Image: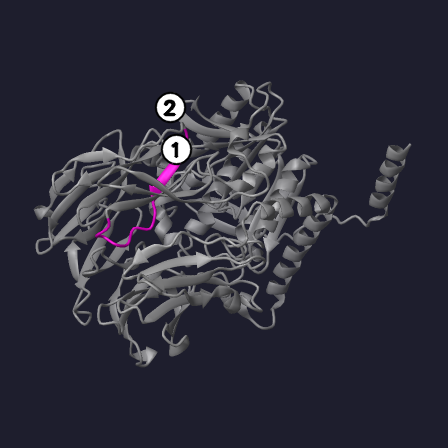
Amino acid sequence: MKKTLCALAIIGCCACQPKVKAPIAKVIPHEFREFENIRVDNYHWMRLSDEQKNAVYPDAQTQDVLDYLNEENAFLRAGMAHTQELQTELFEELKGRMKQDDESAPYLDNGYFYWTKYETGKEYPYYYRRANKEGAVDELMLDVNLLAEGKAYCAVTGISVSPDNRLMAYATDYVSRRRFTIHFMDLTTGALLGDSIPNTTGGVVWANDNKTVFYITRDPQTLRSNRLFRYRLGTEIGNAQLCYEEKDETFSIGVGKTKSNKYILLSSSQTLTSETRILEADRPDGAFRVFTPRSHNHLYRVDHMNGVFYIRSNRDALNFKLMRTNENATEERNWREVIPHRSDVLLEGYTLFTDYLAVNERQNALNRLRIINLKNNSEQHVPFTEEVYTTGFGTNVEPTLKTLRYNYSSLTTPNSIYEYNMETKEVKLIKETEVLGGFNKNNYEAKRLWATAADGTKVPISMVYRKGFQQDGNGKLLLYAYGSYGNSSNPSFNSNILSLLDRGFAYAIAHIRGGSEMGRGWYEDGKLLNKKNTFTDFNDCARFLISENYSSPAGLFAMGASAGGLLMGAVINMEPELYKGVIAGVPFVDVVTTMLDASIPLTTFEWDEWGNPAIEEYYHYMLSYSPYDQTKAQDYPNMLVTTGYWDSQVQYWEPAKWVAKLRALKTDNNKLYLDCNMETGHGGASGRFERLKLIALQYAFLLTL
């Protein structure tokens, strides 16, 4: 009787609540004409300029957009109101696994140990250092919680200390548009200097005179990082000298310093091509000189040690090779081979020491670390034992050290920092992230599976579940992927996923083409006119998991963000019946329109990834999979779409328009929600606890389905 009364009470309460209707966006047809083809976009009006978004008083169009986004958010709140208790439970659970008073492992740099620290209840880190000498005391360099007071969003980046250890640069962004303002602090007094540099990428590189810094500004409209400046502290910002401007709109620039601290590096790069310029850090007023001229389809990256430059290059080497050359003879004709190209091994990166060279390689979708003794050319490998794991270089600043610091984790092993002694081969655990809440890695099992794509290609899948998961076809499974830009989706530990695993879910990562899990060719087979392989691989992985009885269409869920959000849109247009529910985070879905508009941030960099739709062949191919353009009258899975109003990478109007079009065309009664965070951008909330609220919402959405 008690259960019946409770059920009736709940039904009664629900009946009393006012129903919030799904927003119906107004229709204002806007025609696009390309190559004798007409596209009609009924929701083009949702696009606002930066000037409109930043205006103190909204104009009529801006108000219409704000009203629509607020209606969508209200609809989401109403539709998910019954999960509020579950969301709170999930949030506290996610938060409860974090050691709140945690700190990072200190690393040595130029006579000081550096680390970050969190305090219980605080959203943001504290940055500390301590001199490497007996009796030294901890010095608080920066309290980000103080900077964030009264701010809805706060990002800090670019913390960099001058060579004499006296001054510190750091950069802040309070909008989430990734346009950072650089500040300088005297670490001996804690006082801010009068120098402040707006509209930058956030980083500075110090010349060796401790007074000159190099920084990069963004184009105010496209946000392309295109201009390098030299600035002497204590002078007027207006006197900063322009050192270099990248005129090619498909390139962006970056600035750094070699491991030896002898050279400042200015890199220009895009998807297929790169170029480096160098300047001696002891001569900051000099002119940068080209290391070796750019040439189409040649990517290279350089570093320096012991009078020698090392170069990772893909010249006639799809999976890259490692070259070296004397510092006074940098042109490509002088390069000599250190590590040859291998068809089955991707050379992902390297780091230099005085006596050793450490190399990060990838084979069969797994990383490995190789050490080469520069004195006798002997080799060794760092040992790993798990079937599925991820590893990579940690913070290795001091070149004279004999230890390599590296990161390691797996789907069942928390993030860990190790040191490998390159002389003795001893492995030492420095820090393993503590996971609270009763976590025991022995309760979970991870494995590697291989699905067969329609064209016969074997696609790796990494999977984890709680022991006891039944492979009977009734399981719930969340399938994640990214599959773009050559970025590999590594099978690393994520404590948040435990909230799903402990509720009966399995979690799988599909290592689809478009990443580099199986080498650079894996990337080439999932870009440009091969892009559809990315989407069909994902659906083939889904079908494989169903055929192997890990799940079924009634229990299979899919998730991806950014370019992975495009993936979500494409796969459900193609085969919506495979999935019970889909989460598309900050999804890049209006592919053709965005790629035709060079004024939108990041567009010009993307042409070598997706194609330039100003060329007819690419136009028709991109149009054939663009999620927004291919949305049609059919049944779709339950969907949660997320975005940020200030997103500079995938503008909010893409997911907003997509949801409006889906709602107008879809033929089912499944859930469709848009969550637009009005205070954040592409990366979501900046606070370590605040960002968990979105995850709690996403998990509640999945669990209630």
**Is 391 in the magenta?**
yes
Q: Nearer the viewer, residue 247 or 180?
A: 180
Q: Which residue is found at the position 41% from the left and 51% from the top?
A: 596
Q: How many numbered circles does the render carry?
A: 2
Q: Residue 690: horizontal and vertical position, in percent?
A: 58, 55
Q: Nearer the viewer, residue 614 or 79?
A: 79
Q: Residue 194: horizontal and vertical position, in percent?
A: 38, 80
**Is 65 in the magenta?**
no
Q: Which residue is found at the position 31% from the left and 54% from the top?
A: 250
Q: Amino acid at mark 2?
A: Thr
Q: Amino acid at mark 1?
A: Arg
Look at mark 2 in the image and give the residue it sits on: 457
User: Is residue 93 shown above or below 556?
Assistant: below
Residue 202 visible within the image:
no
Quadrant in which the N terminus appears: top right
Q: Secondary structure at mark 1?
A: loop
Q: What label sits on residue 143 in the rendered view?
A: none
Q: Which residue is found at the position 76% from the left and 49% from the top?
A: 20
Residue 698 visible within the image:
yes
Range shown magenta? 388-401
Q: Earlier in the sequence, mark 2 or mark 1?
A: 2
Label 1: few (<14), some or many (≥20) within 10 Å?
Answer: many
As measured in the structure, the alpha-carbon distance from the residue carrying label 2 to the one carrying label 1 is 10 Å
Q: Nearer the viewer, residue 474 or 616?
A: 474
Q: Secondary structure at mark 2?
A: loop
Q: Residue 71: horizontal and vertical position, in percent?
A: 68, 55
Q: What label sits on residue 513 in the rendered view?
A: 1
Q: Is residue 396 left or right of residue 144?
A: left
User: Is residue 236 shown above or below 600?
Assistant: below
Asked if disc 2 and disc 1 are in contact, CB closer than 8 Å, the reply is yes
